């Protein structure tokens, strides 16, 4: 089986203090679909990111660092440091 890329949107809501609470991640079919979903969620969420990750179930290989291609609003520091 060839490596597969997943496109994921993760949104965040404001929580107590200065904390962020993650929503359930949304898996999209394409990078453009993930970007559009993230843009729509950005209107009502404290923050949102869209990223891709590649994995090969057969070999167990996966990206050590996902590629973030869309950011909006407040997001956790670990996502801010990603390329």
Image (cartoon, rainbow, N blue to C red):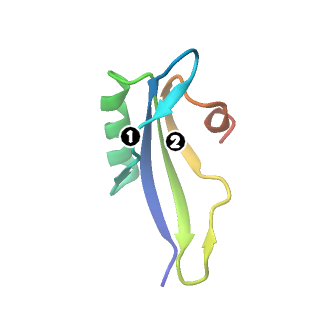
Work out whether residue 44 or residue 34 is closer to the camera in this orientation and state it. Answer: 44
Q: Position of residue 76 (x, y in %)?
A: 60, 31
Considering only vertical position in the picture, is 32 above or below 49?
below
Q: Secondary structure at mark 2?
A: strand
How many labels sit on residues? 2
Considering only vertical position in the picture, is 19 above or below 83?
above
Q: Position of residue 55 (x, y in %)?
A: 55, 69
Work out whether residue 76 or residue 62 is closer to the camera in this orientation and state it. Answer: 76
Q: Farthest residue toward the front? A: 16
From the viewer's perspective, tell me whether residue 60 is left or right of residue 22: right
From the viewer's perspective, tell me whether residue 73 is left or right of residue 80: left
From the viewer's perspective, tell me whether residue 48 is left or right of residue 66: left
| Mark 2 to mark 1 CA distance (whole Å) | 8 Å
Contact check, label 2 and label 1, Cβ < 8 Å = yes
Q: Position of residue 9 (x, y in %)?
A: 42, 44
Residue 67: numbered disc:
none
Considering only vertical position in the picture, is 52 above or below 45?
below
Of labels 2 and 1, earlier in sequence is: 1
Q: Name the residue: 61% across, 82% down.
A: 59
Determine which residue is flagged by label 2: 69
Q: Name the residue: 32% across, 38% down.
A: 36
Residue 35: numbered disc:
1
Disc 1 packing (10 Å; few <14; some 14–19; many ≥20):
many
From the viewer's perspective, tell me whether residue 74 is left or right of residue 82: left
Q: Farthest residue toward the top? A: 17
Disc 2 packing (10 Å; few <14; some 14–19; many ≥20):
some
Work out whether residue 81 or residue 18 is closer to the camera in this orientation and state it. Answer: 18
Q: Name the residue: 37% across, 26% down.
A: 42
Considering only vertical position in the picture, is 78 above or below 1?
above
Check the picture and name the quadrant holding the C terminus.
Answer: top right
Q: Position of residue 46 (x, y in %)?
A: 44, 22
Q: Secondary structure at mark 1?
A: helix
């Amino acid at each position: 089986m060839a490596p597969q890329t997943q496109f994921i949107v993760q949104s965040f809501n404001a929580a107590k203090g200065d904390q962020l609470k993650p929503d359930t991640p949304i898996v999209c079919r394409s990078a453009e679909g993930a970007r559009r979903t993230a843009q729509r969620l950005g209107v009502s969420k404290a923050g949102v990111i869209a990223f891709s990750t590649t994995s090969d179930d057969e070999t167990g290989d996966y990206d050590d660092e996902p590629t973030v291609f869309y950011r909006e609003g407040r997001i956790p520091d670990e996502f801010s440091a990603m390329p």
